[in-house]
Amino acid sequence: MSESMATIGAPHPGVASGKGSDAVIHPAWVRVTHWVNALAMVVMIGSGWRIYDASPLFPFVFPEQFTLGYGLAGALLWHFAAMWLLVVNGIVYVMLGFLSGRFRRKFFPIRPREIVSDLIAALTFRLSHNDLSVYNAVQKLLYVGVIGAGVVIILSGVAIWKPVQFQELTALFGGYDAARYVHFGAMAAIVGFLAVHVALALLVPKSLRAMIRGR
Amino acid sequence: MSRMRKKIPGVDPRLLTKDAAKLMPEPSRRLFLRGAASVGALAFLTGCDIVDGDTAEGALRVVSRFNDSVQAFIFDPTKLAPTYPESAITRPFPFNAYYAEDEAPEVDAADYALEVGGLVDNKKSWTLAELYALPQEKQITRHVCVEGWSAIGSWTGCPLRHFLRRIGADTRAKYVWFRCAEGYTNTIDMPTALHPQTQMTFKFENDILPRAYGFPMKIRMPTKLGFKNPKYVVAMEVTNEDRGGYWENQNYNWFSGL
């Protein structure tokens, strides 16, 4: 505990300032792609909700003030513009994640036993966020999970956008109508992740700072 | 400290307090947070004028034109839309327009003549009897609406490419433009006009196309969104000029391919 406390590197006299204070937790490419992705996701979700409202899958609609785009046409313009940002940025992130070895180092291995113990620790308020450079098993699972949801939302989106030209992909999702449900489900998973992610980032502000300044 | 009693899963309250205490004295950290909060606030204001202003709309239209060319590139003129068995037909097949069903145009079959114009050798008009005499094919395909819903219908008629050959159309032209009885218009790209499943439709299932579905003629394109499939078609023109269309002129994507 004392060692990891030091890695926070707070500028308080008397607290040993370890190497962690200057060590980069998130390299620039992670921070840039993170915030570009955040912007793209906000636009995709906001416009996506407006598009959903034009033909709801479930007996509810999203309140218009939480949606993006002037009418369906405007929402579609936003959705099909931000998709390029989301996809290009996503490809850069995933490629660099693999090539740099960051995914391997940070996200793996994910051990079921650690997930259980970290989850119990989290739910009983004993999970530490002292060392931001190391993810706990629950974080690993969620980060890998949300990247997976990102892949599914892009592929199901393409399946809905081009059910003739990419009909094999659409068929893989169980057809056009089923692909809409998959697309919605992936959105719901991502929004669920976002709720937890944003809440915890605000509760542990140094994690937010690290994603801005890198350390 | 009392506020800390609200327990949040995954957060150690003791460590959190220490974090918070350390955060306070450093103004730069607070600036970061304030900045982040503003970004969040902006994100939640997305329905406002800032993002729906003329500048944003202009930029989005540029991207939409770019998406037209991407879709034209993706479009495979030989790739057929999936077809379905009779049992898959959506019944009743939905009526859809920007007006109510009882306001749909009523075209008089006796007076009807399809006007043909533009870059074609033979500009003579076509009566309904002449059109019905054209070779016909049936297709059971999925109609996908820009709103998201879809429905499977059965359409019978003459492949448009066959008709374009018959009238001596210059198929090197870029577009085919359609005008409808109620004033609806539509411009499509020539590759789509020549697609084997693009059809001048005269029948829904085995009956003459009812008024609700576009009597006397609809242009059925299973490779395009529903609004690109004009109904009550009274005129067509082969042209190199993009004349847009009813919805296309209201910011809906021009190509709208599937």
Image (cartoon, helix red, strand yellow):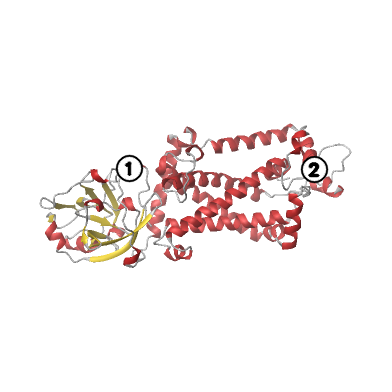
Sequence order check, earlier mark of 2 and 1: 2
Residue B83 placed where, x, y %? 34, 66
The total of numbered circles placed on residues is: 2
Q: Is residue B167 left or right of residue A78?
A: left
Q: Name which residue type carries label 1.
A: Asn
Q: Is residue A78 left or right of residue A133?
A: left
Q: Is residue A163 left or right of residue A202?
A: left
**Nearer the viewer's eye, disc 2 or disc 1?**
2
Let me know if residue A212 appears in the view: no
Label ID, residue B15: 2
- Quadrant of residue A205 within the rendered picture: top right
Q: Secondary structure at mark 1?
A: helix
Q: Name which residue type carries label 2.
A: Leu
- Quadrant of residue A163 within the rendered picture: bottom left
Label ID, residue A35: none
- Quadrant of residue B16 within the rendered picture: top right
Q: Report in which chain the residue with disc 1 lies.
A: B
Residue B203 placed where, x, y %? 22, 60
Residue furthest to the bottom: B85
Q: Is residue A106 left or right of residue A54?
A: right
Instruction: Report the residue at 56% width, 36% height from top.
Output: B42
Q: Report in which chain the residue with disc 2 lies.
A: B
Q: Are there few (<14), some (14-19), or many (20+) residues within 10 Å of tag 1? A: few
Q: Which of A150/A178 is in front?
A: A178
